[in-house]
Image: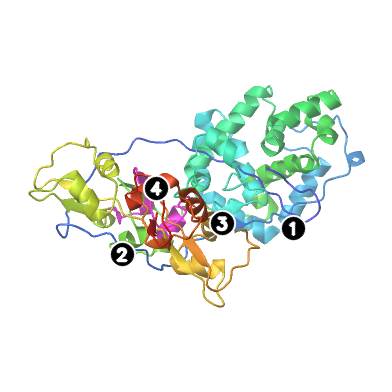
């Protein structure tokens, strides 16, 4: 979580929050047919990509321009004193980047009641909600150059400590409410470690508790303004910038700003019991895929998690969308194993999402949720294509495509090269139609590495009982 102090360079940091809530009782929509078949991978509109953010901040005030003994809060009134570093940041936001900061306040306003409630529940000072304005300009998909992501700019490790899920399907650092609750808990923990000193807690959000403790030892002080020279450069101006955001957010009209707390979208929650193709789901309510992804920025593609997940949908569309959840009505002779084979999903997954035991008998007329099978195939590169154009064609986030193939953004691909097109739900339901003809010297381990799979998966897909291969033999790659 690094913040650059050079004039007009980016500040970028992360935090995130997550609390898992128990799913509501399972609701079964009336099926339109006896079964809904699983669709193959098809090109769709590209999901929104993370925004590379550049938050302009004022030049740090020279150390000899302020008094070390000046308090942050006046003892007479709860207002900011005329501190040069804070004043410089206020002037910068209000004058130099006024329009950008106004746009951030517009995004902030619609979430402010939820922010305040989450911080109050955590016992965290409510004025710290304005920290997100400095962190990410209140953008849920903001990504920093050091990997911080989301409205609260969490790094992966910290996010997981605070309960946020990060996998191939979701990155809950971009979940607005969950990441907010995580940020509130993180700050509360920092305050507990730092004797409730708000300025030191803000500093720790930027550079970590360890660096704050080192600075206190080096400067032999626990006062932020005194130990400021001992902090990392990016943190010295981060705190005044957050204080400026607090001042402007608390008194917008005073500085030529305004914002409304009215939400842009009135939404309701929809619990999806298993993986669902949101593009097909959206058609039921006359929505676009982009609308659902914008309301659920934590989703990394068009599929939802296999084990059940709540998404936000436009108010009044819940019942229509429920009708798009794949359901099969059990017929005489149906069993879990036969249905799992028919719908190309694992039997254990089919049982789990329907709260059944593996060997449990099924009753005719019983409705079963069917997980959407997510296909993972291969694309042969054509002349003029790039990773971006391929990702766009299949509706896969570019970063996901790069990761699946071990590429970076500088990787050059060539015509004839085969590119893995990743699915969105992991290996439990991933299928592939790729085949490979064995050559002299090939081994299962070598082939598994070549196609980013495992030896066990190759054996299972080809019914192999040993590692022995023969030149000319054809393997199915999964």
Q: CA distance from mark 4 to mark 3?
A: 32 Å
Which residue corresponds to the image point at 36% horizontal and 45% vertical from the top-left?
310
Residue 305 appears in view:
no
- Residue 2 rendering spot, x and y as whole percentages: 71, 44
Answer left or right for 475 relative to 12: left
Are the residues tagged 4 and 3 within 8 Å (C-beta)? no
Q: CA distance from mark 2 to mark 1?
A: 45 Å
Q: Which mark is residue 283?
A: 2
Residue nearer the viewer, 415 or 327 = 415
Q: 86 above or below 100?
A: above
Q: Is residue 317 magenta?
A: yes
Residue identifier under label 1:
95
Q: Which mark is residue 378?
A: none
Q: Which residues are magenta?
A: 291-318
Secondary element type, mark 3:
loop
Q: Which mark is residue 457?
A: 4
Q: CA distance from mark 4 to mark 2?
A: 35 Å
Q: CA distance from mark 4 to mark 1?
A: 59 Å
Q: Nearer the viewer, mark 4 or mark 1?
A: 4
Residue nearer the viewer, 304 or 416 = 416
Secondary element type, mark 2:
helix
Q: Nearer the viewer, mark 4 or mark 2?
A: 4
Secondary element type, mark 1:
helix
Q: Nearer the viewer, mark 2 or mark 1?
A: 2
Q: 40 above or below 257?
A: below
Which residue corresponds to the image point at 50% horizontal and 47% vertical from the top-left?
171
Q: Closer to the N terminus: mark 4 or mark 1?
A: 1
Residue identifier under label 3:
50
Local crowd at mark 1 within 10 Å, few (<14), some, or many (≥20)? few
| Colour logic | rainbow
């Amino acid at each position: 979580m690094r913040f650059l102090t050079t004039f007009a360079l980016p500040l970028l940091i992360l935090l995130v929050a997550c609390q898992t809530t128990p799913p509501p009782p399972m609701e079964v929509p009336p099926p339109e047919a006896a079964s809904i078949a699983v669709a193959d991978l098809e090109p769709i509109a590209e999901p929104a990509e993370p925004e590379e953010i550049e938050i302009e901040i004022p030049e740090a005030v020279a150390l000899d321009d302020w008094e070390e003994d000046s308090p942050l809060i006046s003892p007479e009134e709860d207002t900011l004193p005329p501190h040069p570093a804070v004043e410089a940041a206020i002037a910068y936001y209000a004058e130099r980047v006024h329009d950008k900061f106004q746009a951030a306040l517009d995004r902030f306003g619609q979430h402010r009641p939820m922010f305040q409630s989450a911080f109050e529940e955590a016992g965290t000072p409510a004025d710290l909600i304005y920290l997100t304005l400095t962190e990410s300009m209140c953008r849920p998909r903001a990504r920093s150059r050091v990997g911080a992501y989301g409205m609260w700019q969490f790094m992966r490790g910290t996010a997981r400590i605070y309960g946020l899920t990060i996998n191939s399907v979701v990155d809950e650092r971009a979940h607005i409410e969950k990441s907010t609750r995580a940020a509130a808990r993180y700050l509360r923990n920092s305050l507990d470690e730092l004797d409730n000193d708000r300025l030191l807690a803000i500093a720790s959000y930027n550079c970590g508790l360890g660096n704050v403790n080192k600075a206190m030892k080096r400067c032999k002080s626990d006062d932020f303004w005194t130990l400021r020279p001992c902090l990392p450069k990016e943190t010295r101006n981060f705190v005044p910038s957050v204080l400026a955001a607090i001042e402007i957010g608390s008194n917008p009209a005073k500085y030529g700003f305004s914002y409304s707390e009215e939400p842009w979208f009135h939404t309701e929650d929809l619990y999806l019991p298993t993986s669902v193709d949101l593009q097909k789901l959206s058609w039921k309510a006359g929505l676009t895929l982009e609308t659902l992804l914008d309301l659920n920025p934590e989703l990394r593609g068009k599929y939802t998690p296999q084990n059940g997940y709540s998404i936000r949908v436009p108010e009044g569309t819940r019942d229509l969308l429920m009708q798009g959840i794949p359901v099969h009505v059990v017929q005489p002779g149906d069993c879990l194993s036969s249905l799992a084979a028919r719908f190309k999903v694992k039997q254990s997954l089919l049982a789990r999402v329907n709260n059944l035991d593996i060997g449990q008998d099924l009753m005719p007329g019983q409705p079963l949720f069917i997980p959407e099978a997510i296909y993972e195939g291969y694309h042969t590169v054509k002349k003029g294509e790039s990773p971006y154009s391929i990702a766009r064609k299949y509706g896969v986030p570019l970063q996901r495509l790069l990761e699946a193939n071990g590429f970076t953004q500088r990787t050059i691909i060539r015509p004839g090269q085969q590119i893995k097109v990743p699915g969105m739900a992991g290996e439990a339901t991933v299928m592939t139609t790729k085949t490979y003809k064995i050559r002299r010297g090939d081994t299962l381990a070598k082939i598994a590495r070549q196609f980013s799979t495992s030896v066990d998966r190759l054996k299972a897909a080809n019914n192999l009982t040993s590692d022995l291969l023969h030149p000319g033999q054809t393997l199915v790659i999964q």
